[in-house]
Image: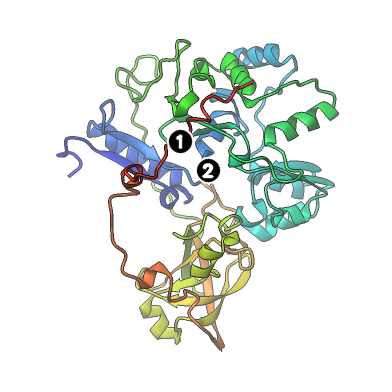
Amino acid sequence: MIADAERVCILWAMGVTQHSNGSDTSTAISNLLLVTGNYMRPGTGAYPLRGHNNVQGAGDHGAMPNFLPGYQPVDDPEVRRRFEDGWNVPLPSTKGLDNHEMVDAIHQGKLKAMYLFGEEMSLVDSNANYVNDAFSKLEFFVVQDIFFSATCKFADVVLPACPSLEKEGTFTSTERRVQRLYQVFEPTEDSRPDWQIVQQVANRLGASWTYQHPSEVMDEIASLTPMFVGVNYRRLEGYKSLQWPVTANGADEPLLYTKRFHFPDGKARLFPLLWREAPEQPDEEFDLLLNNGRLLEHFHEGNLTYRSPGIKEKTPDTFVEVSPELAEERGIQSGSLVQLTSRRGRLRVRAVVTDRVHNGELYMPMNSSESPINVLTGSHTDPVTHTPAYKETAVKLQVLNENGENPLPRNNSRFGHPTPQRGVEVERKWKRPDYRMPGNSLVNIRTK
């Protein structure tokens, strides 16, 4: 089917990457597209979708421990020299630690302090009990976030940041599209944009940073990062966008690899793979396989969406999905209280009987601070990317003698009759006589 199709592109997300062999599966998908001629042309290619908005932008700008902005290796002397000259400071020649390695380093007594912003590690990192135990061992912990999160409870200092609509900046999508974000509201009370907070902390520590606007930060990035050399806020005004790499004259590259691949000879490479079994398998004691992930109504763990009464009304709490076969075997009905136990922890949650799962499979949404799924998940990761194997958790299930209401209320969309449509169909809104295109007053905002 793929070989016979004129054009094929493949999109995948956490269902592939959050396994112990996730990077191998992603590589196999790329190999398949390559041997079937599905690169170098419009309508083809590989699109590994991100789990959050602007995760692509974070990676592009150096959030990983082995890269400076633009995926420039920190262990490359020439790259390091350029940034040292630009920043006028010496840089380490070896990579840093990712979040899982930092947690291990805390337990080993090697890491004493942490400054964390914009991440709910206490709930969303795998093996949450292990992570939270590490946080309690830190000598000094600073958390910067827009709400008082579960992670904030471990902090010595909490710095209030503001969300996207209260600051200026850029977002980058999976297709490498850099888009400008305009401030709509003033920051609430004493909260501030992240760039201001980081600058003020740096200056208290002896730096002399004088940035007045995020556009100046972007200009600095462009001066040191070849793939962003032509990106600036002026070129992004009026909801224009650029897809990196962007040359100095502002020309971008909407489609990669139309002429050559990023190798000296310009040719692509197939990468051979070996099959590896997942390290955690069900056994006689932990006999069920628990999967987990997102839910239509909520964004990730629900720090944002649980604050919306209308959304919370449709999914007031988390639940575990149980197959009809397993429910019949163990006397479970929707609303039954069950206890799930893994090799790391346990939690209690109400069941929903559904044919969305089969036999000994379970599925539990991640959106709960009261019963966080990651007290069950383990620390094993993909060996290349260090992405946790969230989808590979063996558990045992105990039915407790308590039945209650179905955790999915009747006004949930699962019980309705949805009318499918072709996506958002925003054109319908544009045609309304009372609609006014936003942005006319925003595109003229001065950037400095």
Question: Which quadrant is the N terminus positioned in?
Answer: top left
Chain-order first, disc 2 or disc 1 = 1
Residue 115 sits in quarter? top right
The disc labelled 2 sits on which kind of residue?
Answer: Pro
Q: Looking at this view, is 234 or 330 the one in front?
A: 234
Write the residue at 48% across / 58% down. Answer: 293
Mark 2 neighbour density, 10 Å: few (under 14) some (14–19) many (20 or more) = few
Q: Residue at x 48, y 68 (%)?
A: 314
Q: Position of residue 156 (x, y in %)?
A: 83, 49
Q: Which residue carries the number 2 mark?
A: 383
Which residue in the structure is indicated by mark 1? Answer: 173
| Corner quadrant of residue 200 | top right
Residue at point 53% right, 19% down?
Answer: 232
Residue 296 falls in image quadrant: bottom left
Give percent across and percent down for residue 71.
Answer: 54, 25
- Residue at image position (28%, 50%) is 422
| Residue 33 against residue 92 in the figure, above or below | below
User: Horizontal and vertical percent for residue 278?
Assistant: 46, 55
Q: Residue furthest front?
A: 433
The foreground one among 274 and 306 is 306
Give the label on residue 76, or none: none
Query: What kind of residue is marked 1?
Result: Ser
445 or 152, nearer to the observer = 445
Q: Secondary structure at mark 1?
A: loop
